[in-house]
Image: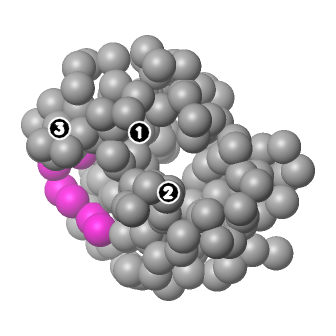
Amino acid sequence: MGISLSKGGRIDLSKEAPSLKKVGVGLGWDTNDSDTGADYDLDASIFMIGANGKIPSDEYFIFYNNLKSPDGAIIHQGDNRTGEGDGDDESMNVELAKINPSVEELVFVVTIDDAGKKGQNFGQVSNAFIRLFDLDTNTEIAKYDLEEDFSSETAIEFGRLYKKSGSWRFKAVGAGFNAGLQGFVDKFA
């Protein structure tokens, strides 16, 4: 069992997992029973951000239609359209040494597809989490359970991997937004 983080919590990966080369990032959630009349489809995405707070090019936005970063550092394992079952609903593999040197942050977000049209929000989602694990050993490093009530939000920034003083660190964010995926695209692209 890794370190349990709360909102705003941070860890230094070079101290907690000094031999870490490949990070698995698992995101999970359960949808509550509701009467929206539509199935839920939650999507995990990564924005690879430079010093200017933007992605270097569109290819550094990793999501269900772009599963691999141009530097080969990130591979999205694909879209889980139902969220059924236990454990990670969507996951990404991150090879730290391959990350483009101009990228300083990886922002992990989850959005609800067509949330406005379907009348859905994160208030209808429970047991949301993000966890980091060593891909080589399958050992969990850290986990953040989002316990906040996001009663109207359609998008959440779960966490960030960021470079500081030459080492990669992770911050549990848990910030909700109402603009869906497009809001993040507008902010980071």
The answer for how far apart the CA atoms under marks 3 and 2 are is 18 Å
User: In this picture, is 116 found above or below 144?
Assistant: above
Residue at image mark 3: 54
Type of amino acid under label 1 = Ile
Indicate the quadrant where residue 149 lies.
Answer: bottom left
Q: Name the residue rendered at 72%, 64% in the picture.
A: 17
Looking at the rendered image, the disc whose residue lies closer to the viewer, 3 or 1, is: 3
Q: Name the residue rendered at 38%, 33% in the picture.
A: 101
Query: Is residue 177 one of those drawn in magenta?
Result: yes
Query: Is residue 119 one of those drawn in magenta?
Result: no
The answer for how far apart the CA atoms under marks 3 and 1 are is 12 Å
What element does badge 3 sit on?
loop
Residue at image mark 2: 168
Looking at the rendered image, the disc whose residue lies closer to the viewer, 1 or 2, is: 2
Q: Upstream in the sequence, badge 3 or badge 2? A: 3
The spot of residue 142 in percent (x, y) is 65, 70
What element does badge 2 sit on?
strand
Indicate the quadrant where residue 103 lies.
Answer: top left
Magenta part of the chain: 175-180
- Left or right: 105 as drawn, with respect to 41: left
Q: Name the residue rendered at 75%, 74% in the picture.
A: 2
Residue at the extreme right: 137
Frontmost residue, 186 versus 97: 97
Type of amino acid under label 2 = Trp
Q: Name the residue rendered at 37%, 69% in the picture.
A: 173
**Mark drawn on residue 46:** 1
Can the viewer see residue 125 in this picture?
no
Q: Residues within 10 Å of mark 2 (few under 14, many from 20)?
A: some
